[in-house]
Image (cartoon, helix red, strand yellow):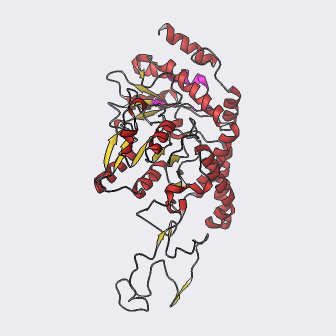
Amino acid sequence: MSSSTDSAAARGKAGLGPAGAPLPHPDLAARWRAAREPAAITHLDAAGCARTSRAAIAAHAEYLTEESRVGGYVAEIRHSQTLTQARANLAQLLGPGLTADDVTFHHSASTAFAALIDAWPLPAGGRIGVVPSEFGSNAMVLAARAARDGIELVDLPVDGDGRIDLDRLGHSELAGLDLVTFPHVPSQRGIVQPAAEVAARAAAAGVPLLLDVAQSLGQVPTTRIAAAAYVGTSRKWLCGPRGVGILAVQAHICDQLTPSAPNLHTATWDASRPPDPLVTLRPGPAGPAGPAGSASGPPGSTSGPRAREKYDHSAFGPLDGIARMGIGESAAAARLGLAVAVAELLAAGPTAVHARIAALGALGRQRLDGVAGWRVREPAAESTGIITLIPPDGVDVHAIRDQLYTDAGILTSAIPTGRAPRDMTGPLLRASPHAYTDPGELEALADGLDRLTRR
């Protein structure tokens, strides 16, 4: 072990940052650890699925109990104010210019992104600015829209770290685009894109920005970006339950969106009447209605009072505002858990949480770089908690990930090249501490990585 590695190890054990100063906000870290069940493993996978607090779990469970007592729809109505406040809190974290009315929930960040790209008004032959480090699922969605509608995907200029190069991103590079989209923090490279600067330049060129904040919301500042739209997720840095995506769109953009798969939660047959909060049956012109869209005769029959009616394709339209981008049916209990998680973040102070995560990330990079031949991919001082490691030649990343878990009880992620095939030349190992992480856990990872790689 080199002297610099020895020094980094000593600082890590002492809870000191890379420069030898104490890591920021130790009281916050202690409170967040105490708010969670004792860890059964060394959890270094916040970028995959972070640890949820007891309070968020309790809110989730209590809501399920209420559903069993009064029914799912009634329970959701009873908690409508809590869910509205959660959307308002998310708008506060995203901002500026967003309110609760601009935020809705989705299944995941990926489905929210797919829904937006599908609904976004793009001309035939339009152009979308992208980056090579785009998340694999999003890249597939973009490629599918490009193939379907003759859209051209145009790479924005990036530097050697994959960061958008502002020196080469001028008005002329943006003016010919119809949309810009990229992940604020890539899943496979722990850098922060200069999203606020790109959004400002794009807006000056009349180009909207759709920003993926799945790996940044809760980890790095997101409040001053002024993107046209955002997608995110509950389960990562927000520490909420799985199964909740977040979609936010500025009001002036939202009514331009045209979802291709409308349903009774997002569109209406009668544009003058909003949907009912509860599912109800209304009598039709010939008696009680059957299932939505049914006639009184069997399929294909020519009998019955409604059989000769023509199907009016213009009789329905999307709801106003963000409601047209919702999903209707969902696991509402998870949304209640997210509501608590977001409130906990705001109560702790996002700035403090961000600073703690960034310091742990910097400490981890310094400690892990060079261990048994592994090399850290991003700059050491990058302000994220995502640490990506390039393996030594001949080392199987997935096998090391598995052995770290089974032999040492350490949870990390193996990142396959399909995560971002234009940004990766081989699999990576990813560690991602959160504010509740003890510095000694990074030291445990360094020791485990050294032992298992050499073995």
Residue 235 lies, in percent from the top left, at 55, 44
Residue 204 lies, in percent from the top left, at 46, 43
Left or right placement of residue 331 versus residue 422 in this view: right
Residue 40, quarter of picture: top right
Looking at the rendering, the stretch of residues picked out in magenta corresponds to 430-445
Residue at the extreme top: 3
Left or right placement of residue 323 versus residue 297 in this view: right
Residue 31 lies, in percent from the top left, at 70, 33
Q: Is residue 436 magenta?
A: yes
- Between 394 and 452, the one lying in front of the other is 394
Instruction: Look at the image and tell me whether residue 243 can be seen.
Output: no
Residue 233 lies, in percent from the top left, at 52, 46
- Residue 179 sits above or below residue 31 on the image: below
Instruction: Look at the image and tell me whether residue 289 can be seen.
Output: yes
Left or right placement of residue 447 versus residue 299 in this view: right
Residue 37, quarter of picture: top right
Which quadrant is the C terminus positioned in? Answer: top left
